[in-house]
C-alpha cells in the first residue's frame, strides 16, 4: 500500500493551494498550505520536518525535511511560491491541474510545484531505511519575489549537506552557473523653476545626462574587463530600463529618476560594483549642484557558479547524457552554495512555460527526472564512500 497519494494527485493538491508571492501586497499570499501538504507527506515517509517562519514575514515558511544523518548527503530543493497569473489569459483554471495533449497545465506545474510531486513519488518507491548519508528535502518561501526564504537559510546556515539539486525548470539540462542580478534606482533632485531663466532653478535632467554618460563609460569598462565564455552573452550587462523626470517643457526639471539592472558574471561582487557606481556620483553632485541618491529596488542576487568538476555536476551529466550549461535567469543556487553545498540546477519542464499563461509540464519530463533523482539518491545517500570509488 503506497503511503502517499499518486503523483498526479499530489501535484493537483499542491497547485490547488495558492501560494503567490509578489512585491505588490494585493497579490501576495502565504505559502502555508503548500508547506503543510509537503510536511504531511514527508512525515508519513519518515522524514523529520522542521517548519521555520521567516523572521520578518510570519505568514511565510521554509521547510527542511531530513531523513538519515551524516556529514555528506544530498539536498533536493525547490520553492513553494508561484508568480501571479494573468486573469483571463488562461484557457483553464490556473489552480486546477488539467491534462491536455500530454501536458499538465496549472500555475506552478513546471515552476515548480510539479518537482515536489515528482520527488515525493520517487522517494516513496525507494528503499531508504539504510541511508549512509542524509537526504534532505528543502522547500523555500518567496523565491519569485525577494528570495528571502533562501537568504534567511543562508544567513542562519540552516541546511548542511555536501550536494544540492534545485529542480527549477531547465528541460532536464544540468546548469552550473548563472549571472547575478542587481536592480537599482538613481534619483537626481535639482530645483524646479520657470524655464525662461535657467538661473531660477537647477535642472535634474541635465544632471541625469551626466549620470548616464558616466554609467555608460563604466559599462564599457566592465565589458572590456570581464569575459566568460560559458555564457551566450559573455560579458556583464547593464540596461537602462526606465526614466522618469519633469512635467512640462516650460518648467525646469526638478527631479529625475533612472532605473537600471546590472547582471554580473560569476567572480564579480555585487557589493564592489555598487560601491564603484556610488563613487561616480559625488563629483556629478558637486558639478551640477544637485542631490543624487542610489538605491536598490530589490535585494541583489549574487551570481552562481559550481565548478564543472564537482561530483554532482559529473553525476548529473552522466544521468542526463547532457553537458552542464548556463542559464540567463537567477536562482537560489548562490544561497545554497553559501551554506557550503555544491549545487546544481536541473529540473523538469521548460523555463519558456514558466511565468506564462497556460503554464504546463510535459508528461515526458516526469520519468527522466525520476531517474535523475533516483540516481543521485543512490549515489550520494545510499552508497558508502568505499563503493563510490
Ligand atoms: Zn522557479
Image (spheres, helix red, strand yellow):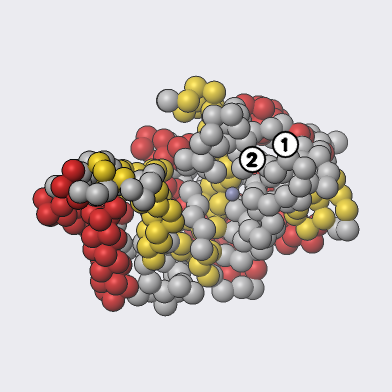
**Pointers 1 and 2 in contact (CB under 8 A)?**
no
Q: CA distance from mark 1 to mark 2?
A: 16 Å
Q: Is residue 389 above or below residue 155?
A: below
Q: Is residue 352 left or right of residue 203?
A: right
Looking at the image, can residue 10 be seen? no
Looking at the image, can residue 287 be seen? yes
Residue at point 38% right, 72% down? 235
Which image quadrant for residue 351? bottom right
User: Which label's residue is closer to the chain start, 1 or 2?
Assistant: 1
Q: Nearer the viewer, residue 116 or 273?
A: 273
Element type at mark 2: loop
Q: Is residue 352 above or below residue 182?
A: below
Residue 92 in the image: state x and y as whole percent: 83, 44
Nearer to us of marks 1 and 2 is: 2
Q: Is residue 2 left or right of residue 35?
A: right
Element type at mark 1: helix
Residue at point 47% right, 40% down? 146
Label disc, if present, on residue 83 of the rendered structure? none
Q: Is residue 90 above or below residue 32?
A: below
Q: Is residue 3 left or right of residue 248?
A: right
Q: Which residue is mark 2?
A: 84
Residue at point 39% right, 44% down? 247
Q: Residues within 10 Å of mark 2 (few under 14, many from 20)?
A: many
Label disc, if present, on residue 14 of the rendered structure? 1
Residue 276 in the image: state x and y as whole percent: 21, 57
Q: Residues within 10 Å of mark 1 (few under 14, many from 20)?
A: many
Residue 132 in the image: state x and y as whole percent: 55, 47
The reply to whether the residue tagged 1 has its Cβ within 8 angstroms of ligand 1 is: no
Quarter of the picture holding the N terminus? top right
Q: Is residue 138 above or below residue 343?
A: above
Q: Nearer the viewer, residue 174 or 60?
A: 60
Amino acid at each position: 500500500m503506497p503511503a502517499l497519494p499518486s503523483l498526479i494527485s499530489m501535484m493537483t493538491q499542491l497547485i490547488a493551494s495558492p501560494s503567490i508571492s509578489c512585491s505588490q501586497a494585493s497579490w501576495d499570499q502565504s505559502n502555508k498550505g503548500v508547506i503543510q501538504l509537503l510536511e504531511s507527506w514527508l512525515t508519513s515517509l519518515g522524514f523529520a520536518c522542521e517548519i521555520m517562519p521567516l523572521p520578518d514575514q510570519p505568514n511565510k515558511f521554509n521547510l527542511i525535511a531530513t531523513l538519515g544523518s551524516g556529514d555528506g548527503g544530498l539536498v533536493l530543493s525547490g520553492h513553494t511560491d508561484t508568480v501571479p497569473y494573468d486573469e483571463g489569459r488562461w484557457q483553464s483554471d490556473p489552480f486546477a491541474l488539467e491534462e491536455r495533449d500530454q501536458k499538465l497545465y496549472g500555475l506552478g506545474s513546471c515552476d515548480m510545484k510539479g518537482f515536489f510531486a515528482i520527488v515525493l513519488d520517487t522517494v516513496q518507491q525507494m528503499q531508504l531505511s539504510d541511508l549512509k548519508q542524509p537526504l534532505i528535502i528543502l522547500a523555500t518561501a518567496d523565491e519569485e519575489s525577494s528570495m528571502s526564504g533562501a537568504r534567511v537559510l543562508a544567513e542562519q546556515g540552516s541546511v548542511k549537506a555536501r550536494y544540492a539539486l534545485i529542480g527549477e525548470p531547465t528541460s532536464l539540462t544540468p546548469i552550473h552557473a548563472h549571472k547575478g542580478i542587481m536592480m537599482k534606482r538613481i534619483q537626481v533632485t535639482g530645483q524646479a523653476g520657470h524655464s525662461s531663466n535657467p538661473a531660477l532653478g537647477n535642472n535634474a535632467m541635465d544632471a541625469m545626462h551626466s549620470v548616464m554618460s558616466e554609467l555608460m563609460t563604466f559599462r564599457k569598462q566592465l565589458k572590456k574587463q570581464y569575459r566568460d565564455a560559458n555564457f551566450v552573452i559573455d560579458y556583464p550587462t547593464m540596461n537602462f530600463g526606465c526614466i522618469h523626470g519633469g512635467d512640462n517643457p516650460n518648467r525646469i526639471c526638478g527631479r529625475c529618476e533612472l532605473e537600471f539592472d546590472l547582471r554580473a558574471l560569476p567572480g564579480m561582487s555585487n557589493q564592489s560594483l555598487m560601491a564603484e557606481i556610488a563613487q561616480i556620483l559625488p563629483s556629478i553632485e558637486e558639478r551640477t549642484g544637485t542631490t543624487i541618491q542610489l538605491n536598490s529596488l530589490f535585494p541583489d542576487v549574487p551570481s552562481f557558479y559550481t565548478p564543472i568538476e564537482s561530483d554532482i555536476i559529473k553525476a548529473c551529466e552522466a544521468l542526463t547524457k547532457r553537458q552542464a550549461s548556463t542559464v540567463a535567469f537567477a536562482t537560489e543556487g548562490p544561497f545554497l552554495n553559501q551554506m557550503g553545498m555544491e549545487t546544481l540546477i536541473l529540473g523538469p519542464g521548460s523555463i519558456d512555460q514558466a511565468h506564462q499563461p497556460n503554464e504546463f509540464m510535459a508528461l515526458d519530463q516526469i520519468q527522466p527526472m525520476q531517474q535523475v533523482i533516483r540516481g543521485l539518491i543512490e549515489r550520494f545517500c545510499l552508497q558508502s564512500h568505499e563503493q563510490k570509488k
